[in-house]
Amino acid sequence: MKRLCIGIISFLFVLLMSDIVFAQQKTFTIDVLQVTHVDAFERVYQGFVQELKAAGLVEGQNLKVNRRIIDFDIEKGGLWKKVGVLLEIKKTASKIVEARPDLVMTIATPATKYAKDRIIAAGIPLVFSAVIIPEAAGCKSLTVAGPGFTGSSIYMEMADVLKIVRLAFPGIETMGIVHTDDDNTLAQVEQLKVAGPGSGFTLINKEVNKSDRFTPAAQELIAQGAQAFVVPLDTYYGLRDYEPCAELSEVSIKNKMPVLSLVHMNVPGALLYIGSDLRISGALSGKQAAKILLEGANPDDLPILRQDDLTIMVDTAVLKSLQIELPMEILMLAKDLN
């Protein structure tokens, strides 16, 4: 009986080792799906592939990545353009299903929300990244995705963000937000407006089209009492070689108004950055993808991940140009953007 048990254990050990060796020798295929090519998404993608590399999945060796970027003229959005993009996402999802990759990674809310059902139904695990509010992408909660998929979120408690802003700018009561109708953006703006009173802030906003200039909207908000500006996660600010940001910087300097950025991109004119690092979001999704591919983990069992602590950065060059003094507590917590 003893020999039989030892034999069974040995057999199971050999079987397990064979699976591990097979996983190491196999070339895995990952399809990445995103809408438009912007710097923010590039940071997410780079964090993703770097984390896969750290786990032993290297492009050109045991990993093949097919990146599918859906073209969309975001400056000429409009309802029908948006409908067209949603149809294109679903069409691309069908093409991915036909290709049968080992895993799909989606970047941001639209690609995740409108592609996941077809991919999951085909039995292909899906990992998303850079989603602000998981429920808006079809997840059960902030921490649980649902059958067949998981991912990482850049969700942040706006009450926590505004506590930091209150510490940084004790004299400011009203902040303005110029934004477009991006899904993620609208969600952030609404969260800010709800959380504002808890920290003594009033948030006023102006929605613009992707092709609109920043300055007229900013002047309208200043006339309504804005003392600072907030930059949400909005593709608008990265358009036309960051032209809206350049205008934002001019308005900020002219009026001695600080700018808070909720996205960790180099936003010309922003003084204080508070939020999730997009590379970290990509890396967290990479960790989950590696577990699924190399360890056979079930996406259902992997909780939605997000960065533990908010990253705070200060642009000291902007600080000097505005001649603003920040409390020592902020300076001790923050990294220098430069």
Image (cartoon, rainbow, N blue to C red):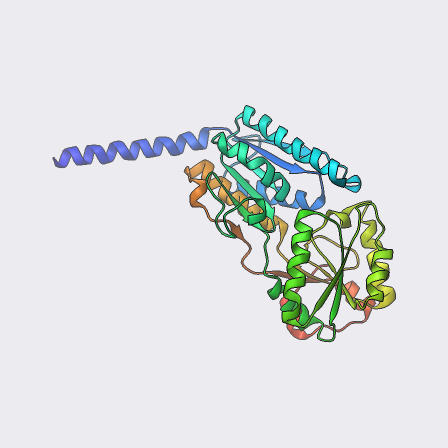
Q: Quadrant of the N terminus?
A: top left
Residue 66, position as x, y percentages in the image: 61, 30
User: Residue 17 lies in what quarter of the image?
Assistant: top left
Q: Residue at x 56, y 42 (%)?
A: 128
Q: Is residue 276 positioned above or below 23 on the image?
A: below
Residue 111, position as x, y percentages in the image: 62, 39
Residue 153, position as x, y percentages in the image: 57, 50
Q: Quadrant of the C terminus?
A: bottom right
Residue 314 is at least partly visible in this image: yes
Q: Residue at x 81, y 46 (%)?
A: 241
Q: Residue reaching furthest top? A: 98
User: Residue 255 lies in what quarter of the image?
Assistant: bottom right
Nearer-the-camera pick, 14 or 314: 314
Nearer-the-camera pick, 128 or 78: 78
Residue 108 is at least partly visible in this image: no
Q: Residue reaching furthest left? A: 1
User: Residue 310 lies in what quarter of the image?
Assistant: bottom right
Q: Is residue 247 positioned above or below 77 on the image?
A: below
Nearer-the-camera pick, 315 or 21: 315
Q: Residue at x 76, y 48 (%)?
A: 236
Nearer-the-camera pick, 259 or 329: 259
Q: Is residue 99 left or right of residue 274?
A: left
